[in-house]
Image: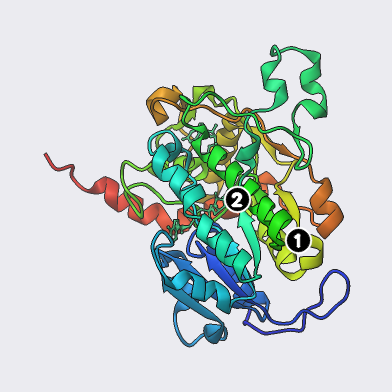
C-alpha cells in the first residue's frame, strides 16, 4: 500500500494537475472502492463518497491515516436526499457509479432496475448540468446488447468478420430482445440515461464522459452468498463461481456456458478512470469502452480456468465433476436473456487517453482468487459446519 504521498502530477499534455475534489456517487461499491484506493494512495485528490454502504471502503475511512483529511463518507440514498446537490456543488466533478447492476435483478426486479439506472440518476445529471460541474457517468457494455453476428446461422462466414461482433462506441447499434425478456430492462435504462447525458451536453453544455465497462473483475466484487450477502442472492459470475469453489461444489454453467465475455482486471480499468479524471480536455464529450479484448473466453472456459487457478492457490483438489449445466430459467427465472459476445473496440480510448489493459486473465484470476480464498475460506467452512435448523 502506498503512503498517501501527494506527488505533483502532470496530465497527458504535460500540464500540472491541480488537486481536485471528486464526488463519488456509489463510491462504496466494487468499482468505487478501488477508485477511492487509487485516489487516496496515489494522488492528492479529495473524495466525497456517497453510498448506502461503506463496508468496502471502511479501511480507507478509519481515522489517523495519511489520507484521512482527504476522504469523507456520506450515508445517503440518492433516491430521496436533499443533501445530494450540495455535495455535488462542493466538488469539481462527479463520478456516478450508483446502480442496481446484477443480472439476477434485471428480470426479477425490473422496476427497481429501471428506477435505479434511469430515474435515480436523473438528479445527478441535472445537478451537474445546472451547476456547471463535470460528470463521469458509468453506463455499461450491455447497452450494445446482442451482436449483429448473433442473428446469422452459427457457421455463417460473416460471423468471423469484426464488423459483425466488435463493439464500437460510435458505430455499433444497440440490439435488445423483446420487452417480455426483462433482462434488457437494465440495458434499456442505461441507454436512455446515456442519451439524456449526451443531450445535456449538446443542448446545455454539460461536460460529460460516459464509461462503458466490459466485465471489470477483481477483489471485493459483489458478495459471497450466506457470508457477506443474502444466502439466496445471486451475484455476478466471478462471485458465483468463487462461492462454488469455496464450498467445493460444481460451478453452474447457465445454458451450457456458451456466452463469451472479455474480462479486465479492476486495477487496469481504474487506471483508465484516473486518466479520464485528470485529462478533461481529452475525456469530455467522449463515450469510452473500457475492457480487455485479449481476455476473451466462453463462460465455460472461465469456469475451467477458475477451477484450475483456485486449486493452485488453495491447495484444494479439483472435483471429479467440476461444472454442471443449468438452464437460465432455473438459474435466473422467467425473462432472462443474454449478451452473446462482448469484444470492445479500443480505438477511441487509445486515441484519447493512450490507455491499454495489461493483465492477462490467468494473472488477474490468480490474484483475485488468492484474495477470495484468504478472505472467505474460513468463514465458508464455519458456515458449512453449522447444523442446518430442522
Ligand atoms: P456495485 O453494486 O458494487 O456498486 C454500486 C454502488 O452503488 C453500491 O455500493 C450501491 O450501494 C450504490 N448505490 C446503488 N443505489 C444507490 C442509491 N440509491 N443511493 C446511494 N448509493 C446507491 O457495482 P459496480 O460493479 O461497482 O458498478 C458501478 C457502476 O458501473 C454501475 O453503474 C454499473 O452499472 C457499472 N458497470 C459495472 C460493470 C462491472 O464490470 N463491474 C460492468 C458494467 C457496468
Ligand atoms: N453465469 C453462469 N453461471 C453463474 C453466473 C453467471 O454461467 O453462476 C453466466 C451468465 O449467464 C452470463 C455470464 O456468466 O452468460 C456473465 O454473467 P454476469 O452475471 O457476470 O454478468 P453479465 O456479463 O451477463 O453482465
The image quarter containing residue 51 is bottom left
Q: Which residue lies under the disc numbered 2?
A: 366
From the top left corner, tell me how far across and down residue 198 is, in percent.
Answer: 68, 51
Q: Is residue 192 above or below residue 77?
A: above
Instruction: Locate the C terminus by quadrant.
Output: top left
Observer-nearest of 351 and 134: 134
**Does residue 235 appear anywhere in the picture?**
no
Who comes first in sequence, dot 2 or dot 1? 1
* Residues under numbered marks 2 and 1 in contact, where contact means CB atoms less than 8 Å apart: no
* The quarter of the displayed image where residue 296 is located: top right
- 328 sits to left or right of 201: left
Residue name at image x 49 percent, y 78 percent: 72
Q: Nearer the viewer, residue 29 or 85?
A: 85
Residues packed near mark 2 inside 10 Å, few (<14), some (14 to 19) or many (20 plus): many
Question: How would you rate the neighbour count of disc 1 (Cα within 10 Å): few for under 14, some for 14-19, many for 20 or more?
Answer: some
The x, y position of residue 251, in whole percent, is: 46, 33
From this viewpoint, which residue is outermost toward the front?
203
**Who is closer to the viewer here, 123 or 287?**
123
Distance from label 2 to label 1 (Cα)? 35 Å
Circle 2 or circle 1, nearest the eye: 1
**Residue at 66 percent of width and 36 percent of height:** 144
Position of residue 308 measured from the top left corner of the image (x, y, whole percent): 57, 39
Q: Is mark 1 within 8 Å of ligand 1?
A: no
Eyeballing the image, is 228 above or below 150?
Answer: below
Q: Colour mode?
A: rainbow
Q: Secondary structure at mark 2?
A: helix
User: Does any portion of residue 258 appear in the rendered image?
Assistant: yes
Q: Which mark is residue 298?
A: none
Residue under circle 1?
A: 284
Q: Against 352, is 147 above or below?
A: above
From the image, which quarter does the N terminus lie in?
Answer: bottom right
Tell me the SS state at disc 1.
loop
Amino acid at each position: 500500500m502506498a503512503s498517501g504521498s501527494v506527488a505533483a502530477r502532470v496530465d497527458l499534455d504535460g500540464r500540472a494537475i491541480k488537486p481536485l475534489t471528486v464526488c463519488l456517487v456509489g463510491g462504496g461499491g466494487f468499482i468505487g472502492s478501488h477508485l477511492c484506493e487509487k485516489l487516496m494512495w496515489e494522488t492528492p485528490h479529495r473524495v466525497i463518497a456517497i453510498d448506502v454502504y461503506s463496508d468496502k471502503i471502511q479501511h480507507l475511512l478509519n481515522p489517523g491515516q495519511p489520507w484521512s483529511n482527504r476522504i469523507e463518507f456520506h450515508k445517503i440514498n440518492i433516491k430521496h436526499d436533499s443533501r445530494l446537490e450540495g455535495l455535488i456543488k462542493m466538488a469539481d466533478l462527479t463520478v456516478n457509479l450508483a446502480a442496481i447492476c446484477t443480472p439476477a435483478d434485471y428480470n426479477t426486479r425490473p422496476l427497481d432496475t429501471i428506477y435505479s439506472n434511469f430515474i435515480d440518476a436523473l438528479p445527478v445529471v441535472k445537478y451537474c448540468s445546472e451547476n456547471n460541474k463535470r460528470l463521469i457517468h458509468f453506463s455499461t457494455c450491455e447497452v450494445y446488447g446482442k451482436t449483429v453476428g448473433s442473428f446469422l446461422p452459427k457457421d455463417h462466414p460473416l460471423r468471423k468478420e469484426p464488423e459483425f461482433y466488435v463493439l464500437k462506441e460510435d458505430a455499433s447499434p444497440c440490439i435488445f430482445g423483446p420487452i417480455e425478456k426483462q433482462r434488457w430492462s437494465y440495458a434499456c435504462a442505461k441507454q436512455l440515461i446515456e442519451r439524456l447525458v449526451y443531450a445535456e451536453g449538446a443542448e446545455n453544455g454539460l461536460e460529460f464522459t460516459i464509461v462503458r465497462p466490459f466485465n471489470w473483475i477483481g477483489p471485493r466484487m459483489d458478495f459471497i452468498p450466506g457470508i457477506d450477502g443474502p444466502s439466496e442472492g445471486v451475484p455476478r459470475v466471478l462471485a458465483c463461481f468463487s462461492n462454488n469453489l469455496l464450498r467445493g461444489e460444481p460451478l453452474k454453467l447457465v445454458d451450457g456456458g456458451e456466452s463469451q465475455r472479455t474480462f479486465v482486471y479492476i486495477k487496469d480499468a481504474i487506471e483508465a478512470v484516473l486518466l479520464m479524471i485528470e485529462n478533461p480536455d481529452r475525456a469530455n464529450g467522449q463515450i469510452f469502452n473500457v475492457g480487455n479484448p485479449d481476455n476473451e473466453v466462453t463462460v465455460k472456459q472461465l469456469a475451467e480456468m477458475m477451477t484450475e487457478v483456485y486449486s493452485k492457490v488453495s491447495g484444494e483438489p479439483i472435483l471429479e465433476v467440476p461444472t454442471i449445466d443449468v438452464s437460465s430459467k432455473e438459474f435466473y427465472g422467467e425473462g432472462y436473456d443474454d449478451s452473446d459476445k462482448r469484444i470492445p473496440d479500443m480505438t477511441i480510448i487509445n486515441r484519447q487517453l493512450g490507455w491499454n489493459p495489461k493483465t492477462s486473465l490467468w494473472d488477474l484470476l490468480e490474484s483475485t482468487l488468492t484474495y477470495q480464498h484468504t478472505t472467505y475460506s474460513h468463514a465458508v467452512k464455519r458456515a458449512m459446519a453449522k447444523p442446518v435448523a430442522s
